[in-house]
Image (spheres, rainbow, N blue to C red):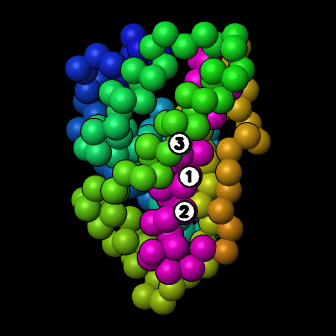
Amino acid sequence: MINNYYTKEVDIISGASMNDVPNILWLEEIRKEDIISVGGKGASLGEMASIDLPVPKAFVVTAQAFRRFLIETGIEKKIFSSYERLDVENNEALEKAADGAKNMVLKAKMPASIKDEIRKSYKKMSAEDLIVAVRSSATAEDLPDASFAGQQETYLNIKGESALLEAVQKRGEGNILPRQAGF
């Protein structure tokens, strides 16, 4: 399933062009229909913000931004080709493939356009360095056949642009878990 969806030269996600979805969405802009881009947690917070419930000002780095990161750094095809003939029943092979993918994500240089958008959004929240959290809002956290809830890393007490960018990149590698590689 992974190689059929991701290795095609197609930029279509959920009926919309990947280019139609921005790298950053603010909670006030997000609705439940955006779950494919911002995950369940992001969509729920967006819905609460839209009805003026007390939700802290925040932004979401979209799933499409992560995909752009993979494509623009040239690691997308390398990662998915490492999963092509993977025996998903072999836990050792899953661990090895996931570790290789994580290393590629961590070593890749984040594209300047994505970096700049994250920096601008962070500054828009406050002129001073805020302490923030970088957490997952997986777009497929609770599937009928699998659940990844609670398996993703959360980074707390992040202060400053460079710490934020590092946490976002680590959060991206956190999207690659052995169990997820099997789906």
- Residue 65 position within the rendered picture, expressed as x and y whole percent measured from the top left: 36, 46
Asked whether the beta carbons under mark 1 and mark 2 sit within 8 Å of each other, the answer is yes
11 vs 106, nearest the viewer: 106
- How far is mark 3 from mark 2, CA to CA? 14 Å
Residue named by callout 2: 167
174 vs 35, nearest the viewer: 174
- Residue 140 position within the rendered picture, expressed as x and y whole percent measured from the top left: 59, 29
Q: Is residue 125 above or below residue 13?
A: below
Residue named by callout 1: 171
132 vs 58, nearest the viewer: 132
**Position of 36 compared to 147: left or right?**
left
Q: Which residues are magenta?
A: 158-183
Magenta-drawn stretch contains 157:
no
Image quadrant occupied by the C terminus: top right
Q: Which mark is residue 102?
A: 3
The amino acid type, in three-letter code, at marker 3 is Lys
Query: Dot 2: what SS?
Result: helix
Marked residue nearer the N-terminal end (3 or 1)? 3
Q: Is residue 84 above or below residue 131?
A: above
The amino acid type, in three-letter code, at marker 1 is Arg
Q: Is residue 102 above or below residue 156?
A: above
The amino acid type, in three-letter code, at marker 2 is Ala
Q: Residue at x 63, y 66 (%)?
A: 133
Q: Residue at x 34, y 46 (%)?
A: 69
